[in-house]
Image (cartoon, rainbow, N blue to C red):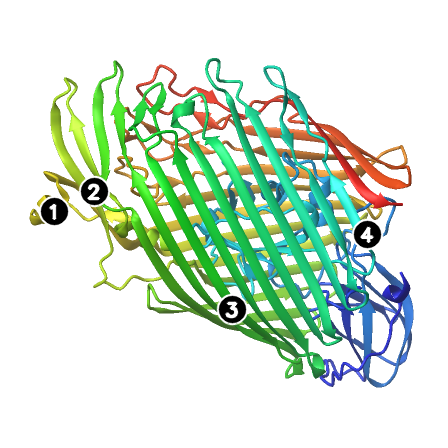
Amino acid sequence: MGRGFGTRVVCLGVFASMAFGAEVRLTGRVTDETGAPVAGAKVFLTVPERLEAATDATGVFHLAAPAPGAFPIAAEREGFFRLKERLIELQDGNNEIALELNRARAVFESVDVPAVLNTVDATQVASQETLTGKQILFVPFPSTNSLRNALRIVPGVVQDSRGGIHINGGSEDQTLYTLDGFNVSDPLTGRFESRLSVESVQEVELYSGRFSAEYGKGSAGTLAVKTTSGDDKLRYSGTNFVPGIENRKGLMIGNWTPRVNLSGPIVKGRAWFSNSLDARYDQTRLEDIQEGPDTMKSWRYSNLLRNQINLTPSNILYTGFLVNYWNAPRTGLSVLDPIETTVDRRSRQWFVHVKDQMYFTRGALFEIGYAANRTFGREIPQGHNLYVFRPEGKGGTYFMDATRKASRDQLLGNFFLPSFSWRGGHRLKMGVDLNRVSYWQDARRTGIDYYGNGRTALRRVLFAGSGRLSESNWESGAYIQDAWRAKSNLTIEAGLRHDWDRILGNHRASPRIGFAWSPWGLEHTRISGGYAIVFDATSLRLFTRPLDQYSLTTYFQRDGSIGRGPAVSLYSIDRSTDLRSSRYGNWSLGLAQALPWNLYVRVDWLRKRGYDGFTYANSITADRPAPPDLLEAFGATTFDAIYRLGNDRRDRFDSLHVQLRKTFGTQYEVMGGYTRSRAFSNAVVDVNVDDPIIITENVGPMPWDTPNRLVSWGVLPTFWKNWSTSYLMDWRTGFPFSIQDDEGRLQGKVNSLRFPTYFELNIHAERRFVFRGYRWAFRMGLNNITNRRNPTLVNNNTAAAQFLTFYGGQGRTTNFRIRWLGRK
């Protein structure tokens, strides 16, 4: 690997001691082949006992030896080639060294890419799961071009039937999603809507429960996506450039997901680029539909360009540009939703960011960055008639025609101070995060008719007022965090974060505390835990609801005469009351143990309690009727509800997770994990103008609640050279759902019933070979090999003849993938 396996003395100027009383101190920095720091790398020094240290965010590590001499040193990190043991000469006093790890690219031949599971990092305080680019490429999850689908193989992540991801029992907007350090969450919904090529992903890190005060605005956790950059070698690859053929009511092109990746030097040794293009064509034919149109099509495109420029050896500039486009006509087609009720959806996004990292003497690092996120969404119905709900299914045309635009501008700065000693070793970091978020909407809604059996009209909901609105918000955050190495086997992290935004106008402090401890004599054991107060981001969609349209509902008798109405339902925010920020208290505890035979086991417990959550509740009661003078202004005869925003929401989530992982050699591994959890809330249904459901008791399990889940995946060797097998097994309790009558009124408790138990088993085999001087990898396998239906839709109308009939899901399918990996 050339200079990647050498060591060289560098003038880091680190004079801080380790406070362990040793006379021989070693301070070093681990970088990749482009000079970028490698955080989380493990460094081993044998003196002759084995000493271990982990690098911080700047790539710096500290070790202390009992005496001078020549000692072997090694380093490794998941996703990088291992730096094997080499002798270094240590003198009395301070010693400085630089180590280099080369990133693992596409795996083709037997390479030394360890999973790094045979050791336990005693200094890791945060509860963290890591998904590497190698695992994303090799584990056979459905639709292998989708990063969101890949996240389901991470313990603690559940994917719902619409593809949304839920982390640690939270809704999609309760997670902070970052791309190369910047907030990439949709500025309006808070969801992870961005698409990027899976080949562009270096790793995904999930922080849960307890994590650094650097991360705010996500009570469920932080999902950090890190992408690859180029190096001095020109690399190119292509995947799935041949369309897939399926036999669904006849031969058809099911999906086509071509991806092209190109990376290399702009100026060797100074500047590099990496570009990943991802396209997707989907054609889905629904087997449940026997008559009429039964096919949905969609087109998607994304491109990520990332650059790294080493202005000087101590000043690195990063830039990135992500573009997304999606066109999906006839979205929502199903056996219960005919073609006229579907929606044509279009969306666009561009996300650009730039970051400058500057390294100073004594291991200090300062970085400053800017990111801009712009999104556009369009919903076009097939007409402008009323939307119709019948017991047997829907009719009419979808009721909303909308255009939405949202944006976020983010400015951040982080400063890592030099380490210092005071009753142990300390490493401080601090930073600021400034954001401006804005939203613009133009929505025009028609109305909804509810019919009973015999085509009897029961309820009509019409919409009035203007759906054109705009709103913006300023947000600021600042934090300070200290990593205190109190003893060689005890690390304590304490931090404090402060957040403010213009809409709420209040200041909120979120303290964080965590520890990692290895008992004496049990260096392969880590016990960690902590407590964190975390706040969620302020949702513009929630706070603009009173500016949107309102509904007028007319109720009919069974004979067709008007029983009541039109009754108005309004949304309001009482600015005279002080709204508090949604707050979560997270307790967590974990045990990690390295066992013989390359086994690694961990147990994690998480307890989340949400307080002061936002929810709209009806303020009209028998003793507090609505003001009668408002009726004429809204063209109504009575009130149904005046929903006022308050801090009445309470959430609960508890989970216990047990995980076992084993590595085979340097390329292969198996993971199995079982999670017992419970996600519960007193505001399960989000009451909003677009879903005029009638609900009286809103307490129950969340729609993604999965009390039991067992997930296992692995990449395994075979008896044949250049062959490997991989599998994914996912078993879980079915998602809960509610039932309702033909008037749209929820019956019984919320989410009182469940879908059948979900089970999926995918098995694939891959062959790597050389053809005409180029490297190729061909994979073939079966998804859902047991042919279990796993329905995604249910008729929940109690008046329907098909009540509790399940639909959707996908049976056994054959999957092919071919990857072109460039020249041999």
What amino acid type should be assigned to the residue bearing mark 2? Ser
The numbered mark, 4 or 1, whose residue comes first in the sequence reads 4
Quick check: 225 above or below 433?
A: above
Q: Which residue is mark 2?
A: 569
Quarter assignment of residue 719:
top right
Verify CB contact (< 8 Å) between mark 4 and mark 1: no
- In this image, 322 relative to 737: left or right? right
**Residue 270 pos. (x, y %):** 77, 69
Q: Which residue is mark 4?
A: 113
Label placed on residue 633: 1
The numbered mark, 3 or 2, whose residue comes first in the sequence reads 3
Residue drawn at point x = 37 percent, y = 42 percent: 402
The numbered mark, 4 or 3, whose residue comes first in the sequence reads 4
* In the foreground, 88 or 275: 275
- Front tag of 4 and 3: 3
Mark 1 and mark 2: Cα distance apart in space: 13 Å
Quick check: 115 above or below 799?
A: below
Secondary element type, mark 4: loop
What amino acid type should be assigned to the residue bearing mark 4? Val
Quick check: 549 above or below 71?
A: above
- Front tag of 3 and 2: 3
Label placed on residue 411: 3
Mark 1 and mark 3: Cα distance apart in space: 44 Å
Secondary element type, mark 2: strand
Would residue 405 be seen by someone viewing this image from the given angle?
A: yes
What amino acid type should be assigned to the residue bearing mark 3? Leu
The numbered mark, 1 or 3, whose residue comes first in the sequence reads 3
What amino acid type should be assigned to the residue bearing mark 1? Ala
Mark 4 and mark 3: Cα distance apart in space: 36 Å
- Front tag of 2 and 4: 2
Residue drawn at point x = 79 percent, y = 51 percent: 105
The numbered mark, 2 or 4, whose residue comes first in the sequence reads 4
